[in-house]
Amino acid sequence: MPPPPWLRSLFLTLILSTLLFQICSVTAQENNNDVDDTDGAKDLVNKLQFENPRIRQAYIALQAWKSAIFSDPFNFTANWNGPNVCSYGGVFCTASLSNPSIRVVAGIDLNHADIAGYLPSELGLLTELAVFHINSNRFCGTVPKSFKKLKLLFELDLSNNRFVGGFPKVVLSLPSLKFLDLRFNEFEGSVPTKLFDKPLDAIFLNDNRFQFGIPENLGNSPVSVLVFANNNLGGCIPGSIGKMGKTLNEIILLNDNLTGCLPNEIGMLKKFDVEEVDSVEEVDSV
């Protein structure tokens, strides 16, 4: 007797999910490697003419990314062909900061495209990228270590995808970063203390699997917006939060399993527009 249709559908879904997980796991390991303009990539572009060498590098990066896409239901990348990368959907070019006479890829916006795939290491070739937005897709795996080359990156939005692993520490090496959005992914483990020593303006870490508490140096951060909600952080709100009185406008700590008393230093936060803190479980002092 053949299995019912719903069981066959469930079985197929499980197989596809397993295959996708395996692909993402492999690419996560591959992304730990650095990347340069390899000889193989050179062979592919030798017959094309580019307006400048940086556009050539961008072509290599974007073609590698297109090859790393499994599904593009709305055809956001359908026109990612040919050497004119500035005409690609979701790709934005502007004059180079170091040489205003040439154009470079300065922005990528693929928000709400429902694209499935992963981020290849070749994206590190986009060295003049300032904005990278891929909100609400199905990208998986990890953030490539080659992102350390994106020294001009100002905004990084990886939210609402399927990224995994620990906090992507490569973002800590980005000197120009001001806006970081990692919410609604599967990041896990601890939040690094170095994050709060960076001159960021907004940090969104909500709806992941972070735990092991809020770092004690929280107050070193100059952020105006900080969202931790829906993790499993536990522990207390550090007293150093009082040092954020001149900059912090909004903090959200809902559903983080926090324990202990609210620190008195919270009263030093004078610029608050919104404060949402889950009911804190008080623990007895010894």
Image: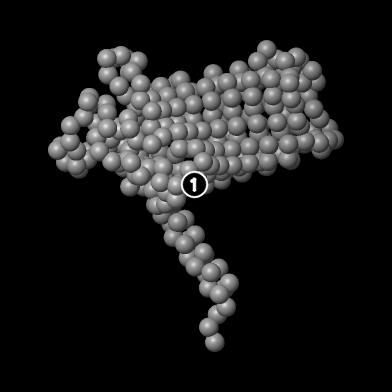
Q: Tell me if 132 is positioned left or right of 240 in this view.
A: left
- Look at 41% across and 54% down and name the residue there: 23
Q: What element carries label 1?
A: loop
The percent coordinates of residue 274 (x first, y second) are 74, 25
Give the answer, above or below, for where 186 lies relative to 282: below
The percent coordinates of residue 269 (x first, y second) are 74, 17
The percent coordinates of residue 122 (x first, y second) are 32, 38
Give the answer, above or below, for where 40 lies relative to 249: below
The percent coordinates of residue 38 (x first, y second) are 22, 38
- Look at 65% across and 31% down and name the residue there: 227
Q: Callout 1 environment at 10 Å: few (<14), some (14 to 19), or many (20+)?
A: many
Foreground residue among 115 and 257: 115
Foreground residue among 132 and 113: 113
Identify the residue under disc 1: 114
Q: Tell me if 154 is positioned left or right of 40 in this view.
A: right
Picture quarter with the N terminus: bottom right
